[in-house]
Amino acid sequence: MDKYREIKWGKEPKNLREVISPNEKINETKEIKEKEEIPRNVKQAVIGIWAMLLYEAILDMALRQSGEINTGNFILSLIINGFLCMLPYKISKRSNPARYTYTIINIAILLFGIGEIDKLKISWTKSIIEMSIQFIIIYKLFTREASEWFDKTNQR
């Protein structure tokens, strides 16, 4: 209360903390606890998703330049990757549906993409590495720590 009187009577506070009332400090700490740090596994998964999206965009450009895919497929792939860019953002904002959407999309790509491997002359080794990275990302999104963090969204 005295801090507010100092401001009211024309005295400037010595630092910004003098302006904040005790009640505001309590609210501030509640906000910090609510925001909570993103778990390490989720951070790593989000970084992995961004890296895979960048990799896919570069691969699509290389395949287009080499003539292995036509312009229509190239544009479609870029549009799909553009929509997929929302997923890592939403996952980092604690969106549980985004986590499941990412998983379902990757399983669908795996199931439907196996037939495309031979058509695009992509090596099996490279495909196995890509699938392994995707499975690691999905695993990190569903670890106990990550699941608890995502479940806290529903408790609010």
Image: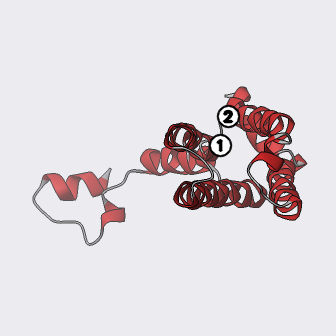
Q: Secondary structure at mark 2?
A: helix
Q: Residues within 10 Å of mark 2 (few under 14, many from 20)?
A: some
* Residue sitting farthest toward the left: 10
Q: Is residue 121 left or right of residue 23?
A: right
The quadrant in which residue 98 appears is top right
Point 57% across, 41% down: residue: 77
Q: Quadrant of the C terminus?
A: top right
The quadrant in which residue 52 appears is bottom right
Residue 130 image point, x, y percent:
80, 58
Residue 27 image point, x, y percent:
50, 44
Q: Nearer the viewer, residue 89 or 21?
A: 89
Point 79% across, 38% down: residue: 103
Residue 31 image point, x, y percent:
54, 45
The amino acid marked with disc number 1 is Ile
The quadrant in which residue 115 appears is top right
Residue 90 image point, x, y percent:
59, 40
Q: Is residue 109 left or right of residue 15?
A: right
Q: Compared with residue 17, is residue 99 higher up or lower down, i.e. above or below?
A: above
Number of the label disc, if any, that sits on residue 98: 2
Point 83% across, 37% down: residue: 107
Which residue is under mark 1? 91
Q: Are the residues flagged by discs 1 and 2 in contact, CB closer than 8 Å? A: yes
Q: Residues within 10 Å of mark 1 (few under 14, many from 20)?
A: many
Q: Nearer the viewer, residue 43 or 138?
A: 138
Q: Secondary structure at mark 1?
A: helix
Q: Compared with residue 125, is residue 136 higher up or lower down, i.e. above or below?
A: above
Q: Earlier in the sequence, mark 1 or mark 2?
A: 1
CA gap, disc 1 and disc 2: 6 Å
